[in-house]
Image (cartoon, grey):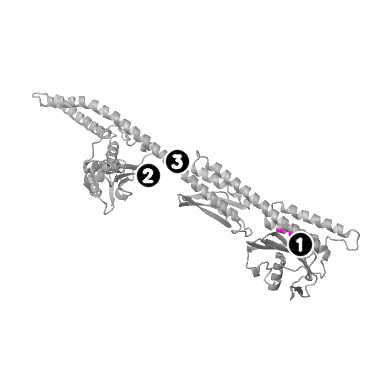
Amino acid sequence: MDSHLSHTPGQRGYSRKLAEEFCALSRRILREANSGVPRDEFTRMVLSEFIEFSGCDEVEMRVNEGSRYYRGVLKTGPDGKFRFSLKTNDCPQAQEAFSGDESEDQNVTRMLQKLARGDYDSKQPGFTANGAFLIANCATPVMFEGRAITVRSVYQSLAILPFTIADNSHGLIILKSRQPGFFRELEVEFYQGVAQSLGVAFADRRAQAALRERVKELTCLYELDQVLSREEKDIGEIMKAAAEKLPPAWLHSDIASACIELDGIRYETSGFKNAVHRQSAVIRVHGVPRGKVEVVYREPRPVLDEGPFLKEERNLIEAVAREIGLFIERWEAREEKARLELQLRHADRLATIGQLAAGIAHELNEPLASILGFSQLLQKMPGMPEPALRDLDRIVKAALHARGVINKLMFFARPRPPQQMSISVNQLITESMYFVQSRCAKAGVQVVYDLAPDLPEIQADPTQLQQVVINLAVNAVQAMPGGGTLTLATRKKDGFIALIVQDTGVGMSEEVKAQIFLPFFTTKPVGEGTGLGLSVVHGIVTAHGGRINVESAPGKGSRFEVLLPLLTPKELQERR
């Protein structure tokens, strides 16, 4: 190939013209360093500048950046076209650093390593005034540090140009030609000046690339913070929007995709499934793994710090996972706070209704007692006509029913203190279900017992707890008009005994579930039930220092979990 350096030493102004052309070459390299292209593209561009400018047959660049070593080669093929290759790997051992292909002699490798580090005496033969090393004919052994080194190569002449990037980073440009004596010493000195400019370009490019990456990372974290601040959004929408913010922050953003996985649900950006390279970080909520953040490349890319990913990207993806974990903690804390506030409002509402119910029950009890008493007296009077007796019987039955309703209402409003004694919850369940078995059989409901063995006894009122079991079981049967399965289970749970009644019935909506403990609330047809059964259950459980958890959804049945403390209500109060 013909060199662009068409001047000869005998021409007037040769050195000045040569300097101008080499300055132009240096400026082009510096400009390319500022273009922001990836490292492999920058390496190819630099080698193209050298091979086109010099007219040689091959240009090789070897760079050691401390933790990373790479070797780029650009050569002229048989068809006259350039062929580029780049190999990157972790920085090898000292004796292997700056190695070429497998056929390269170790003595040559060591010589090149010393040249790159500046570990040589420039007064030795072959060195130019500014530190370049010139081999005019590879057929002749080269003297280096007093040793004859044979450079076995298809090329006849080499110009080796060391350059420094930083304290622990250095490199070489090796110009190769098939012609002996192709490189002139004066030109090689200028090439060495360009090589030093290349070192500056590498350092500048590294600083600019680091700055660009930091800007991208900070932008990503800022935009992620904006997304995670949208409390009014659904959490699925927030995770999807957060995933969309990740790919632009990675080095090869044009082929990057991201996924945030939370509690088994994945929120992916387009193209995520076609992953070639993958980087991930675990999402932890209160120290517990709940998912992960992943960024992938859809196409192969050269190896950098972690596969094709930068070490800064590892820090970024860890920061993103950490921020999402903190967001989930805040989100769940808000939901728990809202749930507790709703529970408190519900308790206040029940207390208010209880006070109102107590007053109403008291006002109704007196006239009802009079009606019942006088009706019973009239029944005992001699000579009462038969039709009148039948009417009086209806009055008495209606009054007794009304008194039962008022008694339940009074129990909800002012439950009497439990008559404490040691009882076995498992035994209580089996005894209570004796009264419901026939009803279950008629309704086509199968009863399943899942009672935990060796449960400790609790201090409770057996009559009241029997009422709890019967009321919950009857409600469950009524929720399965077409038959189903009624499961009664017990568990020991964090200082409580859990009594669980679960059905496979019609289930409840959230609106219904929020009102089931209110007096007189019922979903049954008019004339079927008073709406006081669950209110009484709530009053009994509360009087025992317990609580009730309800899980239900339309078409999925209901699950009532009654938690009864192992301590008595008095002991609970003392501990508080």
Q: Relative to 226, is 492 above or below?
A: below
Residue type marked 2: Lys
Disc 3 target residue = 334
Secondary structure under the numbered disc 1 in the rendered image: loop
Distance, label 2 to label 3, CA atoms, is: 27 Å
Magenta segment: 43-47
Question: Which numbered disc flags the more N-terminal residue, 2 or 3?
Answer: 3
Disc 1 target residue = 81
- Which is nearer the eye, 352 or 124? 124
Disc 2 target residue = 556
Residue type marked 1: Lys
Is residue 108 found left or right of 56 in the rendered image?
A: left
Q: Relative to 45, is 100 above or below?
A: below
Secondary structure, magenta segment, majority class: helix
Q: Residue at position x 69%, y 70% from top?
A: 110
Q: Position of residue 469 (x, y in %)?
A: 26, 43
Q: Residue at position x 23%, y 36% from top?
A: 416
Label 1 environment density (alpha carbons within 10 Å; few <14, some 14–19, many ≥20): few
Distance, label 3 to label 1, CA atoms, is: 65 Å
- Where residue 51 sits, quadrant-wise, is bottom right
The mark closer to the camera, 2 or 1, is 1
The answer, for residue 197, to whether it is visible in the render is yes
